[in-house]
Image (cartoon, rainbow, N blue to C red):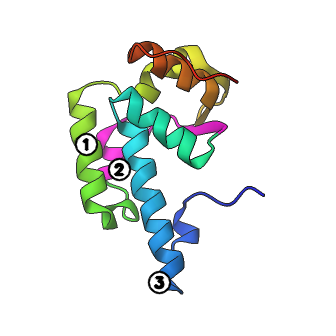
Amino acid sequence: MNQPWVSGEHALAYHTGYYDEFRDRTEALLEAHYTTDPTQLSKFTSTYGVDFWLIDNWVFQPAAITENRWLRQYESAVENAVQHMSAGESVLQQALPLCTTASTDIWTVLDAKCVDDFAAKLSDRPPKAS
């Protein structure tokens, strides 16, 4: 069964065990989303069983995370994401032209297997078998 990943609507901390898991997932997602390290992105995809990436088309602008009131509570993850953005395009951003399966004016869907194969090429490692 697929579980909700992260969103402001799911972030109410009624139970610390729930919130701890939610916080960890949110921080891991932010780190993977903005990383310039292909191995780190592949590890996230594998660990959490990601099949598709749903990308807000505005999300690669620093203001998308620094001005997001909900994300500001994850201060260190946001700071890391901004540092990654200043270092260059994230692996996900680089994979957009190759791995997009659908897009609208607001959203883009990337195939995670394609992104992982792209990351493998960037890190000079063989792609994972399907």
Q: Secondary structure at mark 3?
A: helix
In the drawing, does residue 2 fall left or right of residue 117? right
Precedes in sequence: disc 2 or disc 1: 2
In the drawing, does residue 93 fall left or right of residue 130? left
**Residue at 65% across / 30% down in the picture?**
104
Up/down of 104 relative to 73, above or below: above
Q: Is the C terminus in the top left, top right, bottom left or bottom right quadrant? A: top right
Q: CA distance from mark 3 to mark 1?
A: 28 Å
Residue with the mark numbered 3:
16
Residue with the mark numbered 2:
65
Give the foreground label among 3 and 1: 3
Q: Are marks 3 and 1 in contact (CB under 8 Å)?
A: no
**Residue at 33% across / 24% down in the picture?**
89
Specify start and end residues of the magenta stretch as a single range. 51-66
Q: Is the N terminus in the top left, top right, bottom left or bottom right quadrant? A: bottom right
Say few, some or many: other residues with alpha carbon within 10 Å of mark 2 (under 14 / 14 to 19 / 20 or more).
many
Precedes in sequence: disc 2 or disc 3: 3
Amino acid on which disc 1 is placed = Val
Q: Is residue 93 magenta?
A: no
**Residue at 63% across / 26% down in the picture?**
113
Q: Position of residue 100 (x, y in %)?
A: 62, 22
In the drawing, does residue 115 fall left or right of residue 124? right
Q: Is residue 64 magenta?
A: yes
Say few, some or many: other residues with alpha carbon within 10 Å of mark 3 (under 14 / 14 to 19 / 20 or more).
few
Q: Are marks 2 and 1 in contact (CB under 8 Å)?
A: yes
Q: Secondary structure at mark 1?
A: helix
Residue 28 can be seen in this image: yes
Residue with the mark numbered 1:
82
